[in-house]
Amino acid sequence: MAVYITVNLDIVDRAIYDEYVAAVIPLLEKHNAEIAAADYMAKTLEGTPRDVCVILRFPSEAAAMDWYTDPDYEPLKKMRFSATDNATLMLGKAFEPFPA
């Protein structure tokens, strides 16, 4: 079952964040992830507005967690941490109207 990781964050260092994006895309591809949405101008309907909204689609929860815990992602996480603030990452399963 597909899962989605939703990312909302504020950018505090755009140059480092741009380096992070360039470096993370190949790692996402390695884990069969798809960037379903990425918006620097997302419209906040409720809650606190953030600079960036990204939705990643993975083929399974295992694939998502393999990406998140991949040792190659550790230095990229540090890069993201230094370039952003107020980050929220959430993993949610694809909707199934009648779960088994």
Image (tube, helix red, strand yellow):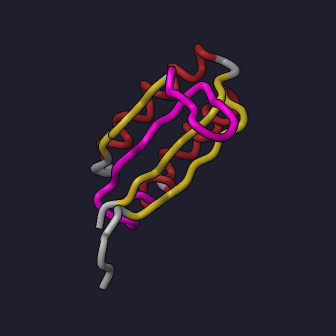
User: Residue furthest toward the bottom?
Assistant: 100
The residue positioned 67% from the left and 36% from the top of the image is 81
Is residue 48 on the magenta stretch? yes
Instruction: Locate residue 27 relative to residue 16 in the image: left or right.
Output: left
Q: Nearer the viewer, residue 45 or 48?
A: 45
User: Residue furthest toward the top?
Assistant: 15
Picture quadrant where residue 90 is located: bottom right
Residue 62 location in percent, x, y? 39, 67
Indicate the quadrant containing the C terminus: top left, top right, bottom left or bottom right.
bottom left
The residue positioned 60% from the left and 16% from the top of the image is 14
Q: Nearer the viewer, residue 14 or 79?
A: 14
Indicate the quadrant containing the N terminus: top left, top right, bottom left or bottom right.
bottom left
Picture quadrant where residue 86 is located: top right
Q: Nearer the viewer, residue 72 or 19?
A: 19
Residue 18 location in percent, x, y? 51, 19
Residue 99 in the image: above or below residue 6: below
Residue 48 location in percent, x, y? 69, 35
The residue positioned 42% from the left and 30% from the top of the image is 38
Instruction: Locate residue 64 relative to residue 14 in the image: left or right.
Output: left
User: Residue furthest toward the front?
Assistant: 45
Residue 89 in the image: above or below residue 40: below
- The span shown in magenta is 41-65
Picture quadrant where residue 25 is located: top left
